[in-house]
Amino acid sequence: MEIDGSAAPTRASSILAAITLIFLVCGCASRELPFHAEGTQGQVGHPIHAAVVIDEKTSPCGGHAGGEALVAARSLPPGIRQSGLNDWLFEGTPTKAGHWTTQVNLIDLVCDGPHPDQTLPMEFNIYP
């Protein structure tokens, strides 16, 4: 059986449309959750407590999401560490002033059902 060049794109878009419809009808379509970072401003020598949080008012699960946060430790400001293994909290006492941007990968997200992984930028501003 030979598929001519004009039928293949039409067939592919029909399949894609059917898959999209299945996800919409079953409620399986996922969207990113409303996460943001808090507490990322600090001063050298003073403890900070930063966190990745979900907006309680706009999240589909009332602000109670689960999952893991992965971040490269060397991308955090000196003196700041992730509170626990894959925890959403970051704490410590900054030892150097500056601006650090890191990416937090949120994986295995659950909020009234599974959600796709997300990447959230965290920007730390540490003042002298």
Image (cartoon, grey):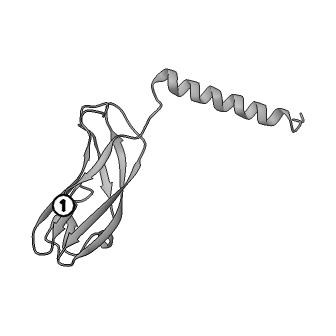
Name which residue lies at 37% across and 49% down: 107
**What is the tally of numbered marks visible in this picture?**
1
Q: Extreme left residue here? A: 46
| Residue 109 appears in the picture as rendered | yes
Classify residue 13 as left or right of residue 73.
Answer: right
Quadrant housing residue 96: bottom left
Tell me where residue 123 appears, x and y as whole percent.
31, 62
Q: Residue at x 60, y 29 (%)?
A: 19
Q: Position of residue 125 (x, y in %)?
A: 25, 67
Q: Residue 83 falls in which quadrant of the image? A: bottom left
For image coordinates 30% across by 33% down, the residue present is 58
Camera-side residue: 85 or 105?
Answer: 105
Q: Residue at x 31, y 69 (%)?
A: 100
Q: Judge the density around disc 1: few (<14), some (14-19), many (≥20) Cα neighbours within 10 Å.
A: some
Q: Which residue is mark 1?
A: 83
Q: Callout 1: helix, strand or loop? A: loop
Residue 91 % position (x, y): 16, 63
Q: Is residue 72 visible?
A: no
Position of the C terminus by quadrant: bottom left
Classify 95 as above or below 41. below
Q: In the image, what residue type sits under mark 1? A: Ser
Q: Nearer the viewer, residue 113 or 100?
A: 100
The quarter in which the N terminus is drawn is top right
Q: Residue most toward the top? A: 25
